[in-house]
Amino acid sequence: MVATIPDSASKLWVPINPEDVPALEELLRREHPFVSVAIDCATPYSLAGYVEHDAAGGPRIHALLDRNLTSRVAELASGCAIDHSAESSKSDRVAAACMAFLAAAKVALEPNISLYEFASTAGDARAFKDLRSLRLAQAIQPQAYLNVALQRASEIHPEAIQDASGRTVIDAETEPFVNFLNPLRHFRCHRALVTKIALLDRTGMNGPEKYRQLLRWSSNAGFFDGTALAFGAIFFGTHRAGKMLKSVRSDSFDRCVAGIKNASWDLTYISHWISRAREDGERAMWTFCTYDWVCASVARSTVGPEGDSLGLFTQNFKSSDAVSLHDEYCDLLVGAPDSDERREVVRQRFESLDDLQLDLDGELSRAINDAG
């Protein structure tokens, strides 16, 4: 409908009730699931800014959604109901609010990494089923999501799903083939670094020394993985969150590896988001959407102001350690692409990444057995 919405002096068309816009913006502002400000507006939750950006012909905005959100969106599109009295329903309402906002703002959704993550545990067939649900979800009118987000409804109205089904063509015979079980390079790299972090966490060293050892390993045996190193700085720092690396000290190898993989997928979303933003440049803008506080925190730490890598260390280590750790980090960053010889070393390490992971897993298994 056409209406004047907050932050705008013009009449803009929005596919939701304009009177609901303040409540939608406030819900998202409070829960803060958007990592970056995609466009120049008062806040990343100002719908008017996005609508005006689209009306002015600005670059297309894309949103990368993590599994925490897409799983709930797929369930809503499949007709599942939400018990608003349950504590877990907050995540469902945030997912619904994201869909309402992004659809109204004409933001293109990118759910593929979440499908790779899902396939890694549930299999390819279920990932494709989820893909079909997400295609349907993107055709559902945003007001239907908003009614759920604002607790006016416990489910997407069946008529809204039926209407979307009539406008969505999903043909399994002509669907482009994607092997969601194909290992992603970002994930493989992150898993190696996170496994090393898990190993170092089992030592008796203090946090700063653990991080120094991680940097030296990255230089001498591993490779520069800026996203995982940012994760390590927070993990070994003074503000470490309990859920950053689940079961990291478990006496079960399988549980420990599951926690490592979970953290590695979080980092994969972040690195994919950063890569797409860099590749598209001025042609498109990218936002990362997650309701995982730890994942959002790591993502924000990797995209601070240019040249502000020092802030990552001053925020997570005591001043006596922050500067020296930052200096070692910068030495590694500068040295990584410094010469043809160094690049060749890194290339060879990437080629033998599977062997490196086997060695790290073996070391982790021995550490767990020795601790037992």
Image (cartoon, rainbow, N blue to C red):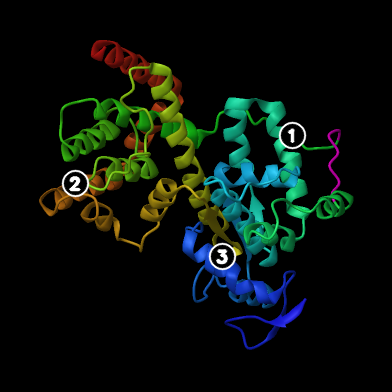
Q: CA distance from mark 1 to mark 2?
A: 46 Å
Q: Give the label on residue 129, or none.
A: 1
The quarter in which the C terminus is drawn is top left
Does the CB distance between marks 3 and 2 fall below 8 Å?
no
Query: Who's the residue at 73% across and 53% down the image?
Result: 138
User: Please, what secondary structure does the residue beneath circle 3 have?
Assistant: helix
In magenta stretch: residue 254? no
Does the CB distance between marks 1 and 2 fall below 8 Å?
no
Q: Which residue is mark 3?
A: 282
Amino acid identity at mark 2: Leu
Query: Who's the residue at 39% across and 44% down the image?
Result: 227
**x, y (%) of residue 17?**
72, 72
**x, y (%) of residue 149?**
63, 58
Amino acid identity at mark 3: Glu
Q: Where are the magenta residues, as a range?
A: 168-173
Q: Given this view, does label 1 or label 2 mark the residue nearer the observer? A: 1
Query: Who's the residue at 35% across and 63% down the image?
Result: 305
Does the CB distance between marks 1 and 3 fall below 8 Å?
no
Amino acid identity at mark 1: Lys
Q: Nearer the viewer, residue 31 or 101?
A: 31
